[in-house]
Amino acid sequence: MNAFKSNIYKYLGGTCQYLIPLYQRTYSWEKEQCARLWNDIVNLHKTHREGHFVGSIVRIDEDSAAGSTLAMIIDGQQRLTTLTLLLIALRDYAASHADCGINPNKITDTLLLNQYETGNAKYKLLLTQSDRDALIKKIEGAPVHDTLKSRVLDNYGFFAGQIAKLEITPADLYDAIGKLQIVDIVLDRQYDDPQAIFESLNSTGMDLKDSDLIRNHLLMGLDSTTQADVYNNIWRPTELLFDYEHQSELLDNFFRDYLTMKLGRIPKKNEVYKEFRAYHGGSGLTIRDLCNDIYSFAKHYTDMYFVRSSDTVLKSLYGDMKAIRMEVAYPFLLKAHDDCDKGLIIIEELREIVRLCVSYVLRRAVCDIPTNSLNKTFATMKNDIKPEDYLNSVKAFFILLDSYKEFPNDEWFIATFLTRDIYNMNRCRYILGRLENWDNKSVVSLDNLTIEHIIPQNPHLSSDWIAALGSNWSEVQKKYLHTIGNLTLTAYNSEMSDASFIEKLDMPGGFRESALRLNKYVVMQSTWGEQQINERAIQLGEVAKKAWPYPELSDVELAPYRKQDETAPQYTLESYQYLNAFNRMLFEKLNTRILNLGTYVKCEFKKLYIAYKADTNFVDVVIQSSRLRLAVNMKFGDVVDPKGICKDITGVGRWGNGDVEVFLDSLDQLDDVMEIIEQAFRLQEVE
């Protein structure tokens, strides 16, 4: 490895061509980074400093057939590209302002082009794919089609706008750019490992995404021919599935869900690349086969995310998924889609599985069940699926979920659906729209419709409304205002406002003129109050049960999936031989505090200890004669214990789970003990 101090003019001024390898990410600097660079340059001029360090550029030089040097950029493409865009913008300004003191041809001939080369070889900097086309068009001053999207174009526009403001003269700007200092690092293939250097640069703070590192890991080690083939025919088509504006973020999310689906557990956010490398090493797949596998699952992922499908039923279900933001189910649904591709299930069964997943998430939201277990539920769901009885095993899985993971049955769901505040749920508009369009062959567009309260929200109701609601009108309004029976959709929300019920019925655009099925019951009424709201709510509840169904299996179909240990001994607090009045008092106080950590915390009495679970055990309590012994389920090195009450039991045989032991022998210690328990509890919360 050799390092040289340089500046951008010296760096671009030779005959070298700088090529961004196929495995590198596309140009990704945004306005924020460009603005910072611009401000640094302006301040450099205003403070009369002699230089400003902007970072290093790492390259590997390779001799081309013509004898000139071809440099593969390992790191630094973002700043090199951005400085090139700034120079193009400065050149273009100079070309249209002949008296600004800058020679535009000098910039083009010495910093943008190798003028004695032809074809792509003439460009000093050659980017990848769409970025390449965008940069070449800007260098050549050629028209850019409206469909071409690239941050190259966005950031060129930013610099062109800044230069036109003349905060700094073009001549001073040119001089200041020349004072930007870089370190030119040249690697030697014989002695340096480019991939190791690439990863170490990321570990020291370079802003590389997991998807960047994964692409690098897969493609860097391939020979140039294979690399180009895999990139152009598999990897690039995979990237193009994702939206331009959020490509890196979505790709990172996809790879985490892809690994969750493959591993049956959720990788930590900061360990996705590490987990991917380990998965790749143990998969036995060639890089080409692995890239093909990634493409296949990315297709399903983006179809769900962007609501794309040639199957109209699936497309509608994807719309439901988008509306209720159920990306949490993607890991399992990726597998279900892949199994459909493989013929393990047919398309009708896939639709039913997606519909049940939507119903599970929506019903839990209506019943106000905490969501922090959902990611782990869907992550491990594949382990309970029987390929030979696929759909029934999915239904059985949902039916047999209990405690905080439960799938609300019809009785629970409808009782809550009819009475809860639906209006202030973030899924309210989706719920009303789904009720309107359920089993409707002529789907109604909701684009111009807004939520309407039939009884108005205004606490100062008109005399007509007070007469309609009766003497306890205020209580009726408060109780039913935001419930499903009092909500509908309309394009005339502002016109209806606080109008009486009869006025809302008969006004132009009123309920009588509405073609919405949501208003079918409403238009048949001559008054509106508690009775009508309850009757309408019951009708809508019947639709809701069908729109978001509960899985159905007969007892015979469900029997093979029930746990076989129902005859196991049942334990209670009285089962523990050392229980006495003192430790019972300690336990009852501790038990209350632990259960108050969350409604989904579950207490189970085991043979030897009492277990408290969120997703898994986070603390286990052993009843001892004069105290309680607690096993806290976390690594001893991770516990924060300022009062030194914890003991390291790593590798020591103890009842319970975890490497941390703590005792409770006095109520005075309860707060300190709970601080330790809460640390283990928080580890199980959603990241």
Image: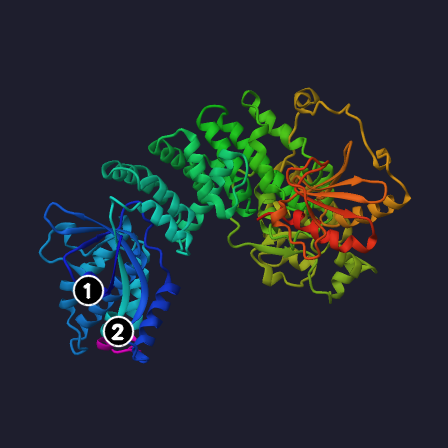
Q: Quadrant of residue 401?
A: top right
- Please tell me whether residue 335 is drawn above or below residue 643 in the rendered image: above
- Please tell me whether residue 452 is drawn above or below residue 325 in the rendered image: below
Say what amino acid the circle numbered 2 marks. Answer: Ala
Residue bearing the label numbered 2: 176
Rendering coords of residue 382 (x, y %): 55, 31
Residue farthest to the right, as pictured: 581
Say what amino acid the circle numbered 1 marks. Answer: Lys
Image position of 635 (left or right of 344): right
- Please tell me whether residue 17 is drawn above or below residue 331 in the rendered image: below
User: Residue at the spot x=42%, y=47% of the render?
Assistant: 210
The CA span between labels 1 and 2 is 14 Å
Q: Secondary structure at mark 1?
A: helix
Residue 223 in view in this figure = yes
Point out the tag, 1 or 2, that comes first from the N-terminus.
1
Residue bearing the label numbered 1: 10
Front one among 568 and 146: 568
Decide whether residue 26 is among the magenta residues: no
- Please tell me whether residue 236 is drawn above or below residue 486 in the rendered image: above
Q: Which residues are magenta?
A: 164-172
Image position of 311 (left or right of 658): left
Rendering coords of residue 466 (x, y %): 77, 62
Of circles 1 and 2, the one toward us is 1
User: Residue at the spot x=41%, y=34% of the render?
Assistant: 281
Image position of 483 (left or right of 18): right
